[in-house]
Amino acid sequence: MNAPPPIPRLLFVDHVERILGGAERNLVELITSAPSRREWRAACACAPASPLRAALEGQAVELYPHRLPSAVAELRLVQRRFSPWNTLRAWQALVSARRRLRPVLDQFRPDVVISCTNKDHFCVAPLCHQPPRPSVWWVNDLISADFFAWPVRRFFCLQARRHATRVVTVSEFSRETLRHEGLPEPLLTVVPNGIPLDRYPPRPRGGIRALLGLGAGDRLIGLVGRFTPWKGPEFFLRLAQAWVAAGEPGHFALIGQAFNEEQGFERALREFVVAHRLEQRVHFLRFQTDVAAA
């Protein structure tokens, strides 16, 4: 009788320390699902005190420490003027983070390494050459001119061509942006984020409406996510303004908050609401731990 094939060993790498963002929630749902437990032996390299680690503790996932130096973690490339000096400092710090990550790969001996953020792609992918193992880049962003400067997009594509075995995007649109930037078609694969239906059952209306003092029958239009320009809250508010001006009934809710240095952007959103006298129809709610209920 032939022995069963060994279960693949998958190492996921995600450095995010302060929040359990969309990419991290998708990661938790993926590697804690029943099929994943049967088909893989999963490990995650993540920040020791992060919400991601807390969400994975006790979930039969091997956990390893992984942090990026502040010069890397605090570097903001989305909709920022490109700074060669700050980027050079971050790259030098990334090399030191790579050295600290090497023992994790040596200890776990993954068959495949999946990096979950742009900075993690650049950190871990060169380690996958010796010994050779697939480096899969899980891309949750839109690497396009709308959000990233040309040098950043160029660097991403150069590094992907050199190091990535496969670049996995979460939508066709995201794949098309990378193809437009010059990544070859065979390198790109779309894998939409799955939805574990048992975790998102239909629920009676109540929670958010109760917080806002609305009735069960009141129409409510919501935007859930971090307050950052590239998620479109400004468009959402312009939509609310036009909706109210047209005499349509209902309320709008922005559920989330700003992180890092984007508090000024959140203030601008709130000032827009006041300036256009939308306070009775547009509501801000802080980050909700139970996103499914929201």
Image (cartoon, helix red, strand yellow):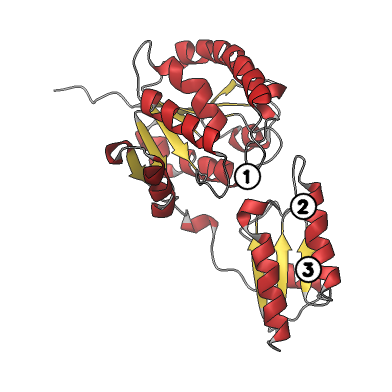
Q: How far is disc 3 from disc 2 in space, using C-alphas?
A: 16 Å
Q: Residue at point 51% right, 31% down?
A: 60
Q: Residue at x 57, y 39 (%)?
A: 149
- Residue 216 makes an appearance in the image: no
- Label 2 or label 1, whichever lies nearer to me, is 2
Asked whether 88 or 213 is in front, the reply is 88
Residue extending farthest to the bottom is 247
**How many numbered marks have been drawn onto this rendered protein structure?**
3
* Residue receiving disc 3: 283
Disc 3 residue type (three-letter): His
Which three-letter amino acid code belongs to the residue tagged 1?
Gly
Instruction: Identify the mark nearer the N-term, 3 or 2.
Output: 2
Q: Residues within 10 Å of mark 1 (few under 14, many from 20)?
A: some
For the N terminus, the quadrant is top left
Please report the residue visible at 32 percent of the width from the left and 36 percent of the height from the top: 187
Element at label 3 = strand
Instruction: Judge whether 121 appears above or below 143 on screen.
Output: above
189 up-or-down from 47: above or below: below
Relative depth, front residue between 158 and 293: 158
**Residue hosting label 1:** 21
At mark 1, the secondary structure is loop
Occupied quadrant, residue 159:
top left
Mark 2–mark 1 distance (CA, rounded to whole Å): 18 Å
Disc nearer the start of the sequence (2/1): 1
Question: What's under tag 2, amino acid-wise?
Answer: Phe
Residue 20, image x, y percentages: 65, 42
Dot 2 and dot 1 residues touching (CB under 8 Å): no
135 sits left or right of 107 in the view = left
Left or right position of 136 against 219: left
In terms of sequence position, does the residue under pointer 1 or pointer 3 come before the other? 1
Q: Are marks 3 and 2 in contact (CB under 8 Å)?
A: no
- Tell me the residue that label 2 is attached to: 265
